Image (tube, rainbow, N blue to C red):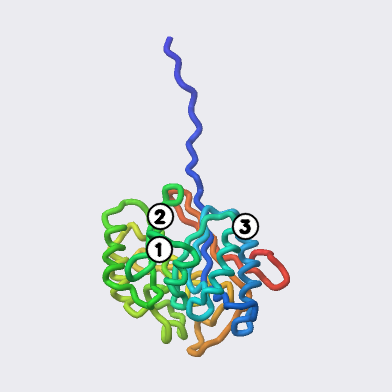
Amino acid sequence: MIGTCPPQPAVMKKIIRIAHLSDIHIGPSDEPVRQFEVRHNFERTLEDIRSEMPDLIVMGGDQAAHCGELDAYRWIKPHLDHTGIPYQIVPGNHDNIDNLDHIFNLGTERKEHGLYSSKRVNGLKLIFLDSSTTYLDRDQLEWLKKEADGSDEVILLFIHHPPLFCNCTFMDSHYPLQNREEAYAVMSELPSIQHIFCGHYHTEKTIRENEKNIYLTPSTMMQMSQDNPDYEVNETSPGWRIIQWNGSRLETAVRYIHPASTDRG
């Protein structure tokens, strides 16, 4: 008699976890930046992230306070290295890609006119774009199409600037991505890109547009009003985003670190 094999347990896919933080705005010294203790906020955020031990930390842009100060990057790098967690640098409009490359030795991620790349984390493809000039040039958009066109897998896209208006009155009016219509038209034609993670607006928000989800991650510096047409700070607690992918479904939530505590919101 030929025996039958006992039922085998289902093979569980590894859950991939990513910490996304943005707009840390570290200054070149220990002095506060616009009265905010940005270094302390960043240290507290990293402590919270380390308790979760994600597979990757994505630094979502505006690492520096003003214009890519080398001393800011020199301070940031050992703090990231100390976590023991791999990390990825995405440039923002307050960053300088030459200085980032100099301190972080970014190698092949550096292109002639930008700092953009793709990588896989446990099989999940991630794409990182460079909007540090507040513009996505044609070369970068063509590269994006080649990286994502025709793919039937889910790809997560990270970019500092949101690629469309977000009903955040002050930032939409004063500091948007300059060629957002052109950039989002390209992204809209790429069905593999279903989830886009951004910073820049210093607020938490999720927008659904053309079957894509655009997630705004709050700042570790401070949060801004979405409704006021003028600059207004409405929250001082640093925030960051946890992203979780189980092979077929994405879950994400924002964590806030409240004063005198590292409890998560």
For the residue pair 57 and 124, the one nearer the viewer reads as: 57
Q: Which mark is residue 152?
A: none
Q: Are marks 3 and 2 in contact (CB under 8 Å)?
A: no
Left or right, 257 with reference to 131: right
- Name the residue that disc number 1 marks: 128
For the residue pair 155 and 116, the one nearer the viewer reads as: 116
Secondary element at tag 2: strand
In which quadrant is the N terminus drawn? top left
Image point 49% across, 40% down: which residue? 12
Check disc 3 and give the amino acid type.
Answer: Arg
Q: Which mark is residue 50?
A: 3
In which quadrant is the C terminus drawn? bottom right
Q: Are marks 2 and 1 in contact (CB under 8 Å)?
A: yes
Indicate which disc, 2 or 1, sits on the residue closer to the N terminus. 2
Q: For marks 2 and 1, give the CA distance.
A: 9 Å
Q: Residue 231 location in percent, x, y? A: 52, 88
Check disc 2 and give the amino acid type.
Answer: Lys
Indicate which disc, 3 or 2, sits on the residue closer to the N terminus. 3
Q: Residue 127 location in percent, x, y? A: 39, 60
Q: For marks 3 and 2, give the CA distance.
A: 22 Å
Q: Residue 173 location in percent, x, y? A: 41, 86
Check disc 1 and give the amino acid type.
Answer: Phe
- Name the residue that disc number 2 marks: 119
Q: Are marks 3 and 1 in contact (CB under 8 Å)?
A: no
Secondary element at tag 3: helix
Q: Residue 106 location in percent, x, y? A: 44, 62
